[in-house]
Amino acid sequence: MGSLLVAFGVALLASPGWCAEESKPGAKDTSGSVRTAPKPSKPRTGAAAKKAEPFDPARAAREYRMLQLELALAKTGDLYMVFDIGRRELELKMKATVVWSCPLEPVSGDPQDLEDFTSKFRGAGDQMARLVTSKYLFEGAERTPDSILAIVGQVVKADPSSLQRDVPERFQLSWGWDLVLEVRTDIAGQPASKLRNTRLTVIEAIRRPFGQTRLVIRMSPEQALTLYRAAGAGLTTVVLPSP
């Protein structure tokens, strides 16, 4: 009799009807609780779902070279200029610390001007640093307050009383004949030399079709004064390209 009961139990558990009842959503177990169907798992999102970017040896090498250059410049204690294209900022640094900065936005409103400037600066050899070769003031106005000169003096490490009081209306920095940064402000100044201005304007117009790249930006008179006083021939300049 016991053997018959065991055989009957095994057959009942193995029957299709029993299995269907156990797996049916909404069925009650022996305690009276209602079973619910398991919810489908949600796809992974966010950082966990993103695949790691493939390793770029060339980019890693550039970043390492740039880090070594910044360390070397910081050790000198000298002022240097940085074009941070990715952050769109123009900076003056000393010992790896930013002592002055302003937005780096082309007057044209075209971001491609920044990319063209970067490409010409770094060249085919991916040059990271160059020296300013010349500076030229087109127009300026004599209206610099002593308070502004004091600030400029701190940045360029000079006696404020010895600084030029002309606030630039327009000036340019050059890295050779083929690369120029032109800075403009919203003040109305007087030409430093009408004859020299005309001569330089004609020369620049002739050079442009032969590969000269010119980036034109605008900044406040106070910012322009600091940059004009700090950025002379021989100033080390670094361009950080977009990531």
Image (tube, rainbow, N blue to C red):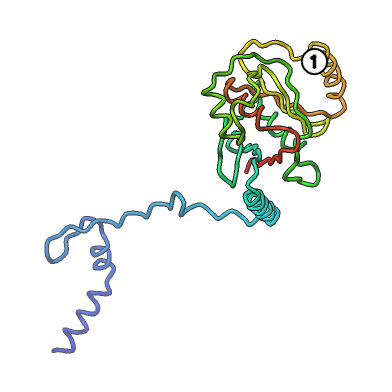
Placement of 179 over or under 222, stated as above or below:
below
Looking at the image, which is closer to me, 146 or 57?
A: 146
- Asked if residue 82 lies left or right of residue 148, the reply is right
Looking at the image, which is closer to me, 204 or 213?
A: 204
Looking at the image, which is closer to me, 12 or 197?
A: 197
* Res 138 quadrant in image: top right
Tally of numbered discs: 1
* Res 159 quadrant in image: top right
Expressed as whole percent of the image width and height from the top left, the position of residue 168 reads 66, 19
The residue located at (29%, 68%) in the rendering is 16
The residue located at (16%, 84%) in the rendering is 5
Placement of 46 over or under 222, stated as above or below:
below
Expressed as whole percent of the image width and height from the top left, the position of residue 212 reads 82, 28
The residue located at (80%, 47%) in the rendering is 125
Given the image, on which type of amino acid does mark 1 rest?
Answer: Asn
Placement of the N terminus among the 4 image quadrants: bottom left
Placement of 165 over or under 13, stated as above or below:
above
Q: Residues within 10 Å of mark 1 (few under 14, many from 20)?
A: some
The residue located at (76%, 45%) in the rendering is 127
Placement of the C terminus among the 4 image quadrants: top right
